[in-house]
Amino acid sequence: MAFLPLHPIGGALADTLDAATLATRSADNAQRDATLAEKQAAVRAGWGADAAARVHEKGKLTTWERLELLADPGTDVLPVGSYVNWGRTFKGSKRLAPGAGVVTAYARVEGRWVVVIANDNTVASGSWWPLSAEKIERAQTMALRLRVPVVYLVDCSGLFLPEQSLSFPGRTGAGHIFRMNSLLAVSGVPQVAGVFGDCIAGGGYMPIISDRVYMTESAYMCIAGAALIKGAKSQHLTSLDIGGPEVHVHQSACADERVPDDPTAITMLRREVARLPSPAVAFYRHGAEPAPPRHDPGELGAILPGDHRHIYDVRQVIARLVDDSLFCEVMADRGTEMVCGLARISGLWTGFIANNVAPTPHPDRPGEMRGGGILYRDGIAKISAFSRACNEDGTPIVWLQDIAGFDIGVEAEARGLLGYGSSLIYTNSTNTVPMITVLLRKASGAGYYAMAGMPYEPVLQLSTPLTRLAVMEGRTLAIAAFNSKLDDNFEIASDDPAERARISAEMDQTAARIEADMEPIGAAARMDTDEVVPLGDLRRYLQAVIEMAWQSPRRVRNPRIWSMHDLVLLSRGATHTPASAAVAATAVDAPVDGLVAIRVTTAGTFWRRPTPRDPAYAEPGETLHPARTIGLIEVMKTFAPVAAGLTGVLERWVVADGAAVEAGMVVAWVTAR
């Protein structure tokens, strides 16, 4: 057996950020979190206080009141799918459908993690809207993949009929819920259900395949409600007469027990969960104890720049997610645009694969740097091997995405990126271990797919308020869409002022529409991501899912016989260039005519100012010091700062703002001091 060396990773914010940057980023992050909290509160409120009051008048609890009773005291309920249907309107309703009228969440019950699926009885009596079924099925799939119990809190009046064509038929329509019930049952995943109200048609079917079914005295389950039967058969009956607890507990045996009210039903559901086998989490810790990170997860909002084009050190992110901020990096000297390694979360082994957005050394051209956040050949090969090893050993994988895409161009094709990329896609398509994908910022192009994006079925995909999910950026897409109207420099190829104005306006509209589509809440509304969470909450969600991944016994090697040991052994003694060093490195010539050249080490576009509206980082005549930023290098929409690298006076610029530069090119002359 080889020893897995865990080393401290990351550092204090004060050592990596100046006070002004720290204050600005922290304030911006606080504003983003506040905006997200407002949206979360709006979803949780359902149709508001009046709807909640009507639920209470019936002697029932609201859905969130039931959830809070169900979860262990002092623990959090972690919602997923909160923003499904956000802002979407429907025919036949003057109101929106917050959360698609259903709450899906992770909760700890009697010390065990469960997936909860609960109709929101404040939204059209828990009706199923378009995407309600898909949201329920997504939660069922999570439970199936993680093999954790499902608790159904059923209070559903059936389909929202004015939009039935969007939710009744189709491969993932409402009927697929019952197929998922069956797959969970045949796989041995426990399901328990509480029936709390009018459960008609599909709402009546949903709890039936559960292992235990409890009904309150005000609940009923039926294929058709009293109103429909009265119309079809002219029979005057109440819904309780048709399918209340008297019928289904004592006559049909479709339910197991009747209870007087909601709190009692919740107590009985908790009792059933307590009867399940104890979690295997402590066994799989192999003697390790959970520990918080040494560096506060709440600092992530200051580490990640709000502008997706600017870089940061991803190891600082990992340091705020893993136990004790300890990390075993694997193959650190190869494919340095990617970071992969092992750490513990809640004492449980977890693999990490992350994009390094800082510039990294070109493997074949000494002294030349390449843009970060891009998949190159060596990095693809590295993470493919690491992903396969994790899968073979049974270790869950967390993917931290901040990716502009695959490398492109003649060199990329000659190096066989298509083949290496296919190998990575095959690996992630056939992995069976739970994979959790976090979209930190950019999730662009085929790189999003290759890094275990949603089409590759991670058990959970999280976005942050900074996430931008799309094939390409808005302006880039507008240029591609209007390419026939542009010249070789991507300028509008017309001398007619009116036509130029029209094309410019249309390009701006296209770019704005794409930028809006990339917004994380919009992606969550379409179910292109599972949940949008504050950066400071990432650790909490990862803890929950990693504990769920280890909660039930499954195919997993003990650490003594991991194939991962081979990768660690082969990469032992390797070193890496910290991101902070990589971004500060500039080539400085010996003096020529009293001047020293500042050269760039990466090919790309050189910018002398943060944005076109901002002043330049430095003007001729200003005194520079080695760490001072004098410009930015842009590579595939990712910006890396260029530091002066010496003390002296800036004499003159050699390149214009926005000029294309090659590695080793002189950008400025300085009088050294």
Image (cartoon, rainbow, N blue to C red):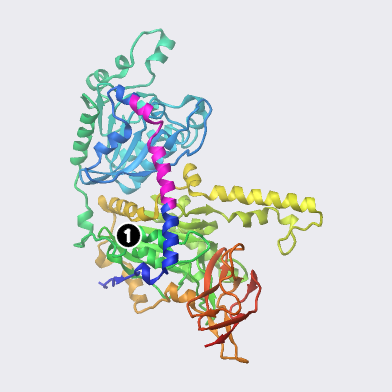
Magenta segment: does it hold 568?
A: no
The amino acid beneath tag 1 is Thr
Q: What kind of element bears circle 1?
A: loop
Residue 20, above or below 61: below
Q: Is residue 497 visible?
A: yes
Q: Which of 176 and 129 is in front in this view?
A: 129
Q: Residue at x 34, y 11 (%)?
A: 237
Tell me if 332 is positioned left or right of 511 in this view: left
Q: Which residue is drawn at 55% across and 57% down?
A: 445
Magenta segment: does it hold 40?
A: yes
Q: In which quarter of the image is residue 342?
A: bottom left
Q: Can residue 433 be seen in this view?
A: no
User: Residue 111, percent across and down?
Assistant: 21, 46
Tell me if 183 is positioned left or right of 363 in this view: left
Q: Mark 1 points at which residue?
A: 395
Q: Which of 651 and 153 is in front in this view?
A: 651
| Mark 1 Cα shell of 10 Å, populated few (<14), some (14-19), many (≥20) | many
User: Residue 216, percent across and down?
Assistant: 25, 24
State the count of labels: 1
The magenta-colored residue range is 31-53
User: Residue 462, percent across and down?
Assistant: 41, 51
Is the magenta region chiefly helix, strand or loop? helix
User: Residue 136, percent across and down?
Assistant: 39, 38
Residue 239, above or below 277: above
Q: In which quarter of the image is the N terminus?
A: bottom left
Q: Which of 298 and 146 is in front in this view?
A: 298
Residue 323, above or below 220: below
